[in-house]
Image (cartoon, grey):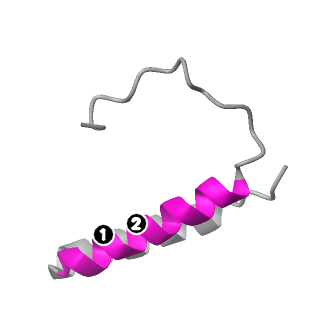
Amino acid sequence: MAEFDPRELAARIDTVLNILVAGDYASAINNLEILKQELESKFSQLPDNQGTPPSPWEI
């Protein structure tokens, strides 16, 4: 399993929040997409959760 550092993740999320507060929505979305790809690649070894219903905000 890949190494997971919650402090690094929290710092990355904080950066995205700061970008949002500054009003640069396109950059914030781009950073979130990069973060998502990195997390998916780190945890691609984990079993699939195909039976899990999507979260309410996943529309």
- Residues under labels 2 and 1: Cα distance? 5 Å
Question: In the rendering, at what x and y percent does residue 14 appear?
Answer: 41, 69
> Which residue appears at 73% of the width and 32% of the height?
47
Provide the residue designation for mark 1. 29
> Which residue appears at 19% of the width and 74% of the height?
25
Question: In the rendering, at what x and y percent does residue 2 appear?
Answer: 81, 56
Residue most extreme to the top: 51
Residue most extreme to the left: 23
Magenta stretch: helix, strand or loop mostly: helix
With 20 as the anchor, is 3 left or right in this view?
right
> Which residue appears at 14% of the width and 79% of the height?
23
With 26 as the anchor, is 14 left or right in this view?
right
Question: In the rendering, at what x and y percent does residue 17 appear?
Answer: 31, 69
Residue most extreme to the right: 1
Question: Is residue 6 visible to the viewer in this orientation of the structure?
Answer: no
Is the residue 25 above or below the residue 47 in the image?
below
Residues drawn in magenta: 24-42
Q: Is residue 48 magenta?
A: no
Q: Is residue 30 magenta?
A: yes
Mark 2 belongs to which amino acid?
Leu
Is the residue 25 above or below the residue 46 in the image?
below
Name the element at disc 2.
Answer: helix
In the rendered image, the quadrant that contains the C terminus is: top left
Q: How many marks?
A: 2
Residue contact at pointers 2 and 1, CB within 8 angstroms: yes
Q: Quadrant of residue 31?
A: bottom left
Provide the residue designation for mark 2. 32
Q: Quadrant of residue 37?
A: bottom right
